[in-house]
Amino acid sequence: MAEQQVVADLRENCATPASLLRDVAAAMADEMCAGLEKEGGSRVKMLLSYVDKLPTGREEGLFYGLDLGGTNFRVLKVQLGGNDKHVISRESRELAIPPHLMSGSSSELFGFIASELAKFVADEEQGTSLSNGKTRELGFTFSFPVRQRSVASGTLVKWTKAFSIEDAVGKDVVAELQTAMQKQGLDMHVAALINDAVGTLAGARYYDEDVVAGVIFGTGTNAAYVEKANAIPKWEGELPNSGEMVINMEWGNFYSCHLPVTEYDQSLDNESLNPGEQASLFYSLPVLAVEHWLNCILWFFQIYEKLTSGMYLGEIVRRVLLKLSLQSSIFGEIDRTKLKTHFHLRTPHISAMHHDNTPDLKIVEEKLKEILEIAGTSLETRKMLVEICDIVTRRAARLAAAGLAGILKKLGRDGSVDKRRSVIAIDGGLFEHYAKFSKCLEATLIELLGEESSKFVVVKHADDGSGIGAALIAASQSQYRNVE
Ligand SMILES: Nc1ncnc2c1ncn2[C@@H]1O[C@H](COP(=O)(O)OP(=O)(O)O)[C@@H](O)[C@H]1O
Ligand SMILES: O=P(O)(O)OC[C@H]1O[C@@H](O)[C@H](O)[C@@H](O)[C@@H]1O
C-alpha cells in the first residue's frame, strides 16, 4: 500500500548506521580544523568568542543577564558570592518573543529587549541603586552567529531559525542594545557578549572543571568548546595568558555528503527563511551530472540544524504526513489547510504523540484532531504516525551524538587514549523536554565511543547554563573586578 511505501522509504532514507555516524563524526572533526585554519575555511564558522578565561568560582557581585534565544527571551539578576560560594541569589523572568519582532526592524527588536530589561530592573530594584555608584553590568547572551571583535562586541553574521531582520545584519549587536537601553534611560554596561553555547559551557564549568563543551539543542543547535590558543592558526592576536580560547562553532551549518538528507529536508530548506544557495551553474550540465553534483554539493544553509533541532522536527513530520494524505487514503477525505501550513505541527506536539503510552494511542488521536483536524484514524494509522516521529527523532538524536563524537575526536578526548574525564554540558528545550531524543542521543554516543571509552565521557543537562554563564563572564570581564 502507498502509505507503507512512504514510511519504508522514510525509514531507509533516514537510516543512521554506526558506520555512517562515524563518517559524520570524522567530517565534523575535519571541518573544525578547516574552520580554525582560516576564515571561510569551513561552513562551520568556528568563531572566536574572546572568552579566554572561564569562571573560577571567585566571581562576586551583582550582575544581570539577557538571553535572546530563538523562541524565548530571558532576563536575570545573579548575586555571586565569590570564593566558591557560587550563586547566592538568582531572579529571572522568561518571555516568549513576539513573532512579529522576528521579522521587524532592529530597533523594534532591541527596543523590546531594552524595555523588558528596564521593567525587570525597576521591579527587582525598587529604585535602590548599586552600592558606591557602580554602574549595573550585564552579560548579553545572543543565540545567533556573531563575528566578535572582542568579548563585548561583535557583528551579526546572519540570522538563523525564524529571525529575518535584514537591517540588523552586519550591525554590532551590543551597540544596538546600548542605543536601545539609552532610549529607556537604562544606565547599564554590557560587560560581555556571548553565544548561548558559550554561556552554557561557562555556566557548567563553574560547577565542574572537567566541562570541555557546551551544547544547545533548543529551537536551534550549536556547540562551543575550549580550544588551545596555539591551535587556532587563523587567530592573529596575541595569545592569552590562559593559553585557551572558547570557540563558538556555529555547527548548525555543518554539511557532509554523509548526512542522510531526504526529499522532506530539501524542500524544507528550499522553502525556509534561510534557504541554501542552489549551485545554479550546474543546472546547465546534463541531468545525470547535475543529479550527482547536487547530491554531493547542494548548498544547504544550517542543514545540520534543520536535521537535529527543535524548530524543525515537527515540520519534517508534517511534511511526511502531508505526503501520506496526498498519496494514500489513510486519513480519508480531510481539509488539508492545517496540514499544509508550514510549522503548524510543532516539536512539542510530536513529542507528546511520540511519548504516548496509552493503550489506544489516545494522545495521538487527540493531537491529530486538535492540531491537524485529522479525525477518525485507526489504531494502525496512529501506530504509523508514532513510527514516523520515531524515525525523524532518532535520526536527529543519532546525528547529534555523531557531532559530539566529532568534537571529542578533534580534542583527542573520546576516551580511547586520553583517559581524562570529559564533561559535555547540554541545554535547550529539545534536550530537556524530549526524553526519547536525549536518551537516544546518550545511548548513541556510548555506541560510537564504545562501552570502555565512554566511561570517561559524561553528558549532563546544564539547566539554564547560558543565563548564569552570561553573568559569570560579565563578572570575569567586569570593569570593577579585582585585577589578578
Ligand atoms: N515539550 C517539548 N518537547 C519537545 N521539544 C520541546 C518541548 N518544549 C520545547 N521544545 C523545543 O525547545 C525549543 C525551545 O528551546 P529553549 O532552549 O527553551 O528556547 P530557545 O531556543 O529560545 O533558547 C522549542 O522551539 C521546541 O522546539
Ligand atoms: O538557544 P537556541 O535559540 O536554540 O539557539 C541555538 C543556536 O541556534 C543557531 O541557529 C544559532 O546560529 C546559534 O548561535 C545558537 O546558539
Image: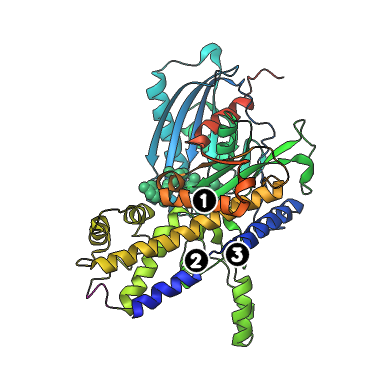
Q: Nearer the viewer, residue 143 or 255?
A: 255
SS majority, magenta: loop
For disc 1, the neighbor class at 10 Å (few under 14, some 14 to 19, many from 20) is few
State the SS at label 1: helix
Number of residue marks: 3
Image spot of residue 449 (x, y percent) = 62, 51
The percent position of residue 295, horizontal first and vertical second, equals 59, 74
Q: Residue at x 60, y 68 (%)?
A: 299
Q: Which residues are magenta?
A: 329-333
Task: Point out the tag, 3 or 2, that comes first from the N-terminus.
Answer: 3
Q: Mark 1 highlights which residue?
A: 443
Q: Which residue is mark 2?
A: 269
Q: Residue at horizontal 52%, vertical 12%?
A: 131
Give, as a three-letter code, the residue at label 3: Leu
Quarter of the figure with residue 238: top right
Give amino acid for label 1.
Answer: Ala
304 is higher (above) or lower (below) than 237: below
Q: Is residue 451 visible?
A: yes
Label 3 vs label 2, nearer the camera: 3
Sequence-first disc among 3 and 1: 3
Q: Amino acid at mark 2?
A: Asp
Q: Quadrant of the N terminus?
A: bottom left
Of circles 1 and 2, the one toward us is: 1
Which of 296 and 133 lies nearest the eye of the viewer?
A: 296
Check disc 3 and report the residue beneath it.
20
The correct choice, above or below, for 478 with respect to 434 in the image is above
Return the x and y of residue 171 as percentages of the image width and height: 59, 47
- Give whichever of discs 1 and 2 has the lower sequence position: 2
Helix, strand or loop at disc 3?
helix
